[in-house]
């Protein structure tokens, strides 16, 4: 049995959870809030205290989203893989995932700045810089999304998962609104969240 550790809001954790579900894997979910005293126990699984982590054996824990997904792809049957095995299709899928991941990384940094740092310690220039980066990444993702259907073709692939997780997460950041309209991303998110794997993992708004 696999065990996925991490919080409810993290887009990194959500990406792995959706991936596991779409691959039809049996797993259990261990909800961990690393901003509470739960962190101390969690460091036995990941000394860095970062999420997600995936326990694949009693004494083996994978950390970092990319490493976890690499394991899931490597051990999946061909019909369950969510990244093409080789060639142009693989390269383009990974490029879309990289863009979505960059949006998430900058979005998390922005959320920390505006939600967790005391207002009198916030750095306005840094917040503006992060906002520009998130907006730029979202615009790039918007251009990659088809007007209908999935980036993966007939069914969602890994880049669809990554893009939806990025889009939905930045929508939870306090005070953030995209600089431009994102109709294709919004439509992709709506299609995806009509599927149980996505609907069950929607990120909550910050408390």
Image: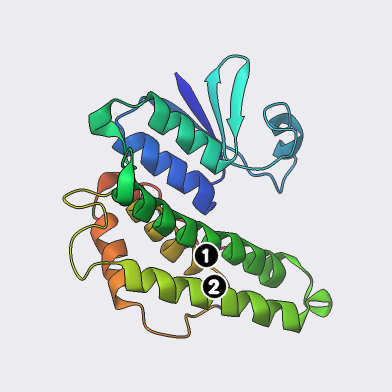
Q: Residues within 10 Å of mark 1 (few under 14, many from 20)?
A: many
What's the residue at 72%, 64% (across, down)? 116
Residue 172 vs residue 140, the one in the foreground: 140
Q: Is residue 74 above or below residue 157?
A: above
- Label 1 sits on a secondary structure element that is helix
Residue 190: image quadrant is bottom left
What's the residue at 29%, 67% (across, down)? 145
Q: Is residue 143 above or below residue 101?
A: below
Q: Which mark is residue 7?
A: none
Residue 74, image x and y in percent?
41, 28
Residue 91 vs residue 16, the one in the foreground: 91
Left or right side of 105 for 46: right
What's the residue at 26%, 69% (across, down)? 187
- Label 2 sits on a secondary structure element that is helix
Q: Which mark is residue 103?
A: 1
Q: Can you say which quadrant of the picture contains the C terminus?
A: bottom right
N-terminal of the pair, mark 1 or mark 2, is 1
Left or right side of 164 for 176: right
Provide the residue designation for mark 2. Answer: 134
Residue 90, image x and y in percent?
34, 47
Mark 1–mark 2 CB contact (< 8 Å)? yes
Q: Residues within 10 Å of mark 2 (few under 14, many from 20)?
A: many
What's the residue at 42%, 57% (across, down)? 95
Marks 1/2: CA distance?
A: 5 Å
Residue 96, image x and y in percent?
40, 58
Q: Is residue 175 visible?
A: no
Q: Is residue 61 visible?
A: yes
Residue 37: image quadrant is top right
Residue 108, image x and y in percent?
61, 61
| Furthest-front residue in this view | 87
Left or right side of 43 for 1: left
């Amino acid at each position: 049995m696999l065990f996925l550790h991490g919080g409810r809001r993290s887009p990194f954790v959500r990406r792995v959870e959706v991936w596991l579900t779409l691959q039809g894997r049996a797993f259990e979910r261990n909800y961990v809030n690393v901003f509470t005293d739960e962190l101390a126990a969690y460091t036995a699984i990941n000394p860095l205290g970062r999420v997600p982590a995936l326990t694949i054996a009693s004494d083996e824990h994978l950390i970092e989203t990319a490493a976890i997904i690499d394991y899931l792809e490597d051990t999946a049957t061909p019909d369950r893989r969510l990244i093409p095995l080789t060639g142009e299709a693989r390269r383009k899928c990974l490029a879309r995932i990289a863009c979505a991941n960059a949006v998430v990384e900058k979005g998390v940094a922005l959320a920390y700045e505006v939600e967790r740092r005391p207002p009198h310690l916030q750095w306005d220039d840094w917040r503006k810089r992060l906002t520009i980066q998130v907006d730029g990444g979202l615009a790039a993702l918007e251009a990659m999304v088809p007007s209908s259907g999935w980036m993966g073709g007939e069914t969602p692939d890994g880049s669809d998962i990554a893009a939806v997780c990025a889009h939905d997460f930045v929508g939870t950041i306090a005070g953030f609104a995209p600089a431009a309209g994102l109709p294709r991303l919004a439509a992709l998110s709506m299609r995806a969240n009509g599927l149980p794997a996505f609907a069950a993992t929607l990120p909550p708004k910050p408390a």
